[in-house]
Image (tube, coloured by chain):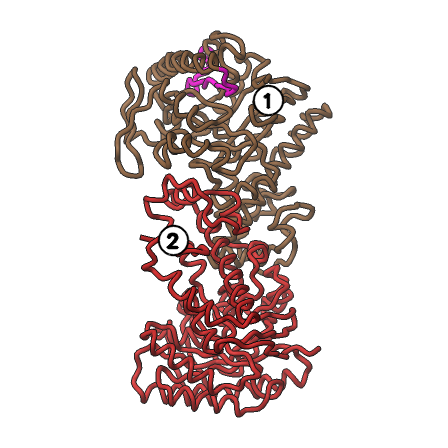
Chain colours: A brown, B red
Amino acid sequence: MTSGAFEVRGRSGGARLGRLVTAHGPVATPEFMPVATVGALRGLTAQDAREAGTRILLGNAWHLMLQPGHERVRRLGGLHPLMDWDRPILTDSGGYQIASLSRLREVTEQGVRLRSHRDGSLHELTPESVIGIQRALGSDIAMVLDECLSLPASPEAVERAAGRSLRWAERALAAHREERAGGTSRLLFGIVQGGVSPAAREANARALAAFGPAGDGFDGFGVGGLLMGEPKEATREATAVAAAALPPERPRYLMGAGLPADLIESAGLGMDLFDSVLPTRLARRGIVFTRGARLNLYRARFRDDGRVLDPGCPCPACTRSCRAWLHHLLRARERIAATLLSAHNLTFYADLTRRMRAAIAGGRFDRFREEHRDRWSRTNPDDA
Amino acid sequence: MTSGAFEVRGRSGGARLGRLVTAHGPVATPEFMPVATVGALRGLTAQDAREAGTRILLGNAWHLMLQPGHERVRRLGGLHPLMDWDRPILTDSGGYQIASLSRLREVTEQGVRLRSHRDGSLHELTPESVIGIQRALGSDIAMVLDECLSLPASPEAVERAAGRSLRWAERALAAHREERAGGTSRLLFGIVQGGVSPAAREANARALAAFGPAGDGFDGFGVGGLLMGEPKEATREATAVAAAALPPERPRYLMGAGLPADLIESAGLGMDLFDSVLPTRLARRGIVFTRGARLNLYRARFRDDGRVLDPGCPCPACTRSCRAWLHHLLRARERIAATLLSAHNLTFYADLTRRMRAAIAGGRFDRFREEHRDRWSRTNPDDA
């Protein structure tokens, strides 16, 4: 099995058209990964996601370790059959929870002690144990444990966390190499840290790349710790520096990138993979993306709007309902509203990345970016 | 169109095998109607309900009048296209809300003034206006406005409410006769009240029947105001007396009957239609019915149970998941758990009524009732 092979098949306007082969099939990039934290998309079945065109899902090792437990997942056959999902799964390591649960954690050189948000129980994650958890889960792409900082952070704190993340990455890679020796086709991605400091990002990216080529070193790279409230320009600069410092023949994943404009802008900086809870979270609030605009279906102006949400969209919200009824279901707090609008948003994201790939293949990504840059911004007049 | 024709095609052990023709197709009885209060099943799409085998849905005129508004529903094309449901819909009148919202209402001979649970706004329902609301909604079977009492109630209160319900029924029928003269195929059901007094139930049923034959008088009859916490034996006696006093050639609907044992027992008393929120409400709490038992999937004993929930069941929970994963989704409060288990319970109910009809057709309903009476009780040892 040649799993792990990443091939760049085309370039346009800074963006790459790629193909990443995993144990559960190939992923054409740029691609977006919806988030199924504990093994389920919020409000959608795996079948719903397949029908939406989703190619790859993201789970979270820390959450799954707590509930239902990674060893239980292994005993029951692994994440794929349990989730009814035979396409690729990437698992995040829990590094992000070091930032988001910062009041509940203690970081040492050995690893991190985190308290469960569920029952307050104390758990230790180490670079090695996180590799073992992801092996038990059976994911296709594992992420190293990293120390993700809340921003803003002092230069010293950024430096310290980036250095520690690098040493952790080396330990994770050593554990993964044992797995590789046993014949796994699981991929391991390192994670570039370094806050919003271009120098720290560049140094961190080069150091991760220096662990070896794909198949010996890391199979790909996440860029983490961004999109956490920092200014857009800082995100952009840190992403651009990291992308430029990473090896061109391996995939790059901008962690937490979720708005359509984020995907388009960062694909133009050479990023290949993206994930976010936004498509489903926004859907629960009534916010949907159509080919033409960002709409908030809660607004009263939709209550008599008998039109299809997005003509031509094959999702159940568009083929089996109208804007006025979706507005009604939201206002009545019927949970099926979230399901229908989440299915719509995932269908939109699958279509958006498909069109991004077509634009790269056609050598017209710059034009695509210009035409779509502001289409889904909050200030779009069609969402007034 | 011969809509409204009800045909009794077989009898066994007190139960009837029937066929009710509506403007949106026939319904074989006994049949269960899942509740879509404001036009949506809790957590399921209409497509999910079709796949579960649901034949007829119930909506609520009072709730739909408040949100999104019956005139808006009419302008947008009616409930059927809005709900994406081309099978029959029965709408309840709002009479039940007179009991359940009793602190928010004032009943007079003219009608009832009710306060919205949503915004406190005051609305008046009359027997005539409720016919108009259901016409605007476009349901296949309309129910008269009745005064439904919370039980226990004094004999005087029961007598007064039953008498008023009868006068309201006459006014509703007059309004519906105007509609009939205009050519509607909508059916109108009267509602038998009378609390747990057999004499009041019998008198009320006979009086409703005396308004005329189907097509001139009522096309069928609900038995209302039961299953509201009174002793099982009182429900049984009031149901039996009402059924015996109602004309045998018209359908009988026991309002609010929702547990499998309720359906089986009351079908054996000659009832044909049933409705309840229980299959979906119980599912949200992890309670499911299989062919063999009632199970609470929240229980810790399911956490390592890799078996199919109910072998042979075609629903997505049974064909695409296992008990341990469903348990996990419930514990993790993933909303998809409610969707999967609701789909399962509706599939179970459709299968249960199908098997009840087969038992009647085969002349073995008594045996069916004996074999299934205690199968889904709370004390079933398999649910220990």
- The residue under label 1 is A21
Q: Disc 2: which chain?
A: B
Q: Which portion, as a residue range, is magenta? A: A183-204
Per the image, label 1 sits on a secondary structure element best described as strand
Q: What's the amino acid at mark 2?
A: Leu
Residue located at (59% from left, 39% from top): A50
Mark 1 crowdedness (10 Å alpha carbons): few <14, some 14-19, many ≥20: many
B183 to B264, vertically: above or below: below
On the image, the x and y values in percent for residue A296 come to 54, 49
The one nearer the camera, A324 or A371, is: A324
The one nearer the camera, A295 or A60, is: A60
Q: What's the amino acid at mark 1?
A: Val
Residue located at (57% from left, 27% from top): A24
On the image, the x and y values in percent for residue B62 come to 48, 72
Residue located at (28% from left, 31% from top): A115
Q: Quadrant of residue A362?
A: top right
Q: Is residue B301 left or right of residue A349?
A: left
